[in-house]
């Protein structure tokens, strides 16, 4: 029998997939009939309560006189509003990510000494095992950085002398090492991909101990290692607003779910990475960038709001871009009036646009944001208001910083590893039972038929 190609879908597999699809189909009406919360959300989009956390809080509604009333979105890290956290930092302070990572992990804002000690710990961990870059990252470079990142994380298990020790101290040590090394794993994987798949020069800059996470990303990524204070500040702010978003987002819930089984840290974080890789979770900012590229091709006058409105209408009617019927970057599963991350980010984005000569593009983004709200409200039946989310601006910022699209989602992971780590610690410390939600079977019962009696 001839060997089957590893990657090829054969005609036989095509036929079997039809059979599998037919067997896998479930009538959507059954979800309503049995009151099943599809996607762990009710018909109004409200999430099913499955856990309790001290780490962060996401609010979009408030109960007033017994009724849920939409409010401007709120995001708290350990009780501190994200807006207050960012706006009270000095403009030349580039260790905001480390400051917030300490807050998420230890439940308090660090003193100057505590922050210095913490950054020194991360700096000490900011290196990879001997020959790891050669033997793991460069051995078989992936064309998807999230795949490379997950593979690297799982491989680090083999370099750990105590990988399965789930004591609180050991899990914290593993989490701190991953927080420190995620930027290196991501950037080095990109450079390996650039070298092997695109024929570009191979660049491997060692990190600098005195640099923050944001500064080291730019230092290790760029050939000349140069960056401006404003660029470092913008990237630091981007990391802060992406590092945590409640226990119910898909990748963080995955961290809780997998951690509840008692598995090791590397497996739990790799599972979270697999979740974030999904375009419904971690790829929205890339879609926004591509949508705007298509808009620029089709809208000749960026100051003509009628022309922009016409394009947005075509998006909603599946006549433009990817014909999905979506205006990417608009709307959120929780927020309705505003996304607090987008609100606090907008001003910084404008500063970077002014500094880099992207004023026209920034004006276009703000125009689309305003008009898209009106278009969606007028053309779609929505149970709540619509606002732009953080992805609407984040891809634009990365583009202005000259960051490659291949690193957009890994940058999300570099930020979110702090939140995942805090949630893993929370799960480990609670010693909870394994999570096991209920599923209802709607399959009919049959009498077993012996093989000799089955008819082709």
Image (tube, helix red, strand yellow):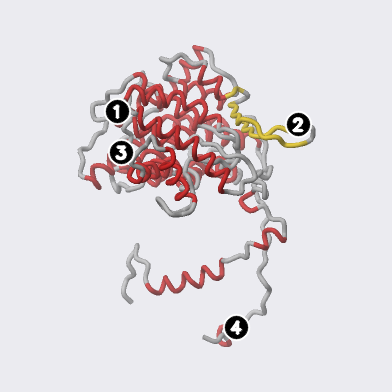
Q: Which residue is mark 4?
A: 450
Tag shown at residue 64? 2
Q: Which residue is mark 3?
A: 133
The reply, left or right, for residue 265 in relation to residue 193 is right
The reply, left or right, for residue 117 in relation to residue 259 is left
Distance, label 2 to label 4, CA atoms, is 63 Å
Q: Which residue is mark 1?
A: 206
Please rate how many residues cluster around mark 2, counting C-alpha atoms within 10 Å: few if below 14, some from 14 to 19, many from 20.
Answer: few
Quadrant where the image shows the N terminus = bottom left
Give the residue drawn at x 33%, y 34%: 403
Distance, label 1 to label 3, CA atoms, is 11 Å
Residue 81, given in percent of the width and then of the height, sits at 59, 23
Secondary element under disc 1, as helix, strand or loop, is loop
Visible residue check, residue 445: yes
Q: Earlier in the sequence, mark 1 or mark 4?
A: 1
Secondary element under disc 3, as helix, strand or loop, is helix
Asked whether the residues under the numbered discs 1 and 4 touch, taking CB atoms below 8 Å apart as contact, a structural biologist would say no
Secondary element under disc 4, as helix, strand or loop, is loop
Please rate how many residues cluster around mark 1, counting C-alpha atoms within 10 Å: few if below 14, some from 14 to 19, many from 20.
Answer: few
Compared with 446, 67 (above or below) is above
**Circle 2 or circle 3, nearest the eye:** 2
Distance, label 2 to label 1, CA atoms, is 54 Å
Q: Quadrant of residue 412?
A: top left
Residue 130, given in percent of the width and then of the height, sits at 31, 35
Q: Earlier in the sequence, mark 2 or mark 1?
A: 2
**Circle 2 or circle 4, nearest the eye:** 2
Q: Earlier in the sequence, mark 2 or mark 4?
A: 2
Visible residue check, residue 267: no
């Amino acid at each position: 029998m001839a060997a089957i190609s590893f990657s090829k879908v054969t005609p036989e597999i095509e036929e079997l997939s039809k059979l599998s699809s037919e067997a896998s189909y479930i009538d959507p009406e059954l979800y309503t009939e049995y009151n099943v919360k599809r996607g762990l959300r009710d018909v109004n989009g409200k999430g099913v309560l499955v856990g309790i956390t001290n780490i962060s809080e996401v609010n979009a509604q408030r109960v007033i006189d017994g009724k849920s009333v939409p409010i401007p979105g709120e995001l708290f890290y350990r009780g501190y509003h994200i807006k207050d956290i960012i706006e009270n930092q000095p403009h030349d302070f580039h260790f905001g990510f480390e400051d917030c990572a300490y807050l998420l992990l230890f439940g308090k804002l660090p003193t100057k000494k505590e922050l210095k000690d913490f950054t020194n710990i991360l700096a000490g961990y900011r290196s990879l095992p001997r020959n790891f870059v050669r033997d793991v990252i460069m051995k078989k470079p992936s064309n998807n950085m999230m795949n490379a990142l997950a593979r690297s994380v799982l491989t680090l298990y083999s370099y750990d002398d105590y990988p399965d020790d789930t004591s609180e101290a050991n899990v914290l040590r593993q989490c701190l090492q991953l927080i420190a090394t995620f930027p290196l794993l991501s950037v080095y994987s990109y450079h390996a991909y650039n070298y092997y798949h695109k024929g570009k020069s191979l660049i491997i800059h060692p990190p600098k101990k005195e640099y923050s996470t944001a500064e080291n990303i730019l230092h290790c990524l760029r050939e000349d290692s140069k960056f401006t204070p404003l660029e470092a500040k913008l990237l630091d702010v981007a990391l802060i607003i992406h590092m945590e978003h409640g226990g119910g987002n898909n990748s963080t819930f995955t961290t809780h779910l997998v951690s509840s089984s008692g598995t090791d840290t590397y497996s739990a974080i790799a599972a979270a990475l697999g979740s974030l890789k999904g375009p419904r979770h971690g790829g929205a900012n890339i879609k926004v960038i591509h949508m705007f590229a298509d808009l620029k091709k089709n809208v000749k006058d960026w100051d003509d709001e009628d022309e922009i409105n016409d394009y947005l209408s075509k998006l909603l009617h599946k006549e433009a871009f990817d014909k999905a019927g979506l205006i990417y970057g608009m709307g959120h599963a929780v927020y309705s009036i505003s996304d607090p991350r987008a609100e606090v980010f907008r001003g910084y984005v404008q500063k970077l646009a002014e500094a880099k000569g992207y004023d026209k593009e920034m004006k276009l983004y703000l125009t689309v944001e305003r008009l898209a709200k009106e278009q969606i409200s007028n053309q779609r039946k929505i149970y709540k208001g619509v606002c732009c989310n953080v992805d609407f601006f984040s891809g634009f910022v990365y583009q202005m910083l000259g960051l490659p699209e291949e690193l957009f989602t890994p940058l999300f992971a570099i930020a979110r590893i702090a939140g995942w780590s805090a949630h893993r610690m929370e799960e480990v410390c609670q010693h909870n039972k394994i999570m096991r939600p209920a599923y209802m079977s709607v399959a009919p019962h049959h009498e077993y038929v012996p093989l000799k009696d089955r008819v082709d």
